[in-house]
Image (tube, grey):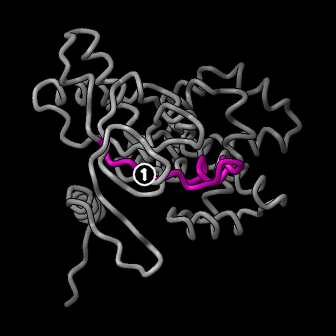
Amino acid sequence: MKERFSRQDRKASLMRGMQVGLIPNTAPNYNMNITTHDEPSSREEQISQLKTVTLLQLRPFDNNPRKMRNPKFDEIKESIRVRGLDFPPNITQRPGETHYIIADGGNTRLQALQELYEETQDPKYFSITCLFKPWQGSADDNISGDLHCLIGHLAENDLRGDLTFIERALGIQQAKQFYQQQEDTVLSHRKLSERLKADGYSISHSLLVKMEQCIDLLYPAIPQLLLNGMGKPQIEKLLQLFSNANTTGKNTLLYFTTQQGILNNFG
């Protein structure tokens, strides 16, 4: 009988895969060179390489889907204090900018390093060696690069399972806006699902519908409850309540904001 893997087994397998070393790309149109440099050059901007940067040179990704403090921040910070930085974040650089940004997850680690350096002034927290990834876009096309970074952040956080439902929904909404800017068109939920899958992020169009409803109908009324971690089952119940209130002709925004006793049961 074919062995079946649980969700935890699959997650453990993915995590082990993240811990392997650099894997060479053998595609004929890909020229990857791994070197270690501190100073950028025009050629180096086009290849993946190990690069040492300081905290003054590195900034968080400004479209980071995480809106709230990582609930595991203290654990991550203490691990870095005791063990050092086991997994440096990947970094990239927009054309024409002198600073680097987090490429695809690792903003929490950067924040932890900043706090540790402020507390200790230990230089081991100030300078780190990261894998530099070329910016996925031209000097006059930041949308492609920002979209690539955003999807990388969503995928990395999905693997760890520590984004709230609304954070994930807002991140995907931003990705949709980037796609629509690129193509100057409006994407249906199905088309958006196809585009995201083609770029390495699989999500069903039915879940995209629920996420859009959550943003449009619930987020204006109860943003803090959602950001604090309300999960999909509770959100689905509230969407049903919203539908019921709308059917009976109630002012739904007023209905939700005044029914705190009901809402607190979902927090």
Where is residue 30 shown, x and y percent of the image?
44, 72
Q: Which residue is found at the position 58% from the left and 43% from the top?
A: 95
- Asked if residue 135 is among those painted magenta in the image, a careful observer would answer yes
Residue type, numbered disc 1:
Glu
Q: Which of 145 and 204 is in front in this view?
A: 145
Q: In which quarter of the image is the N terminus?
A: bottom left
In this orientation, which residue lies closer to the viewer: 139 or 264? 139
Q: Report which quarter residue 192 is drawn in.
A: bottom right
Residue found 20% across the figure and 35% down from its top: 85
| Disc 1: which residue | 44
The answer to whether 29 appears left or right of 126 in the picture is: right
**Mark 1, other Cα within 10 Å: few <14 / some 14–19 / many ≥20:** some
Q: Is residue 218 left or right of residue 163?
A: right
Q: Determine whether 263 is above or below 150 in the image.
A: above
The boundaries of the magenta stretch are 130-148
Identity of the residue drawn at 15% across and 31% down: 84
**Residue that sits furthest to the bottom in the current view:** 1
Q: Residue at x 42, y 57 (%)?
A: 47
Q: Where is residue 55 in the image (x, y as percent from the top left)?
A: 35, 24
Residue 181 located within the stretch drawn in magenta: no
The percent coordinates of residue 38 (x first, y second) are 32, 38
Residue 180 picture location, percent across and down: 77, 55
Q: Is residue 247 left or right of residue 133?
A: right
Q: Is residue 237 visible?
A: no
Left or right, 199 with respect to 25, comes to right
Q: What element carries label 1?
A: helix
Looking at the image, which residue sits at the far right?
A: 249
- Labels in figure, total: 1
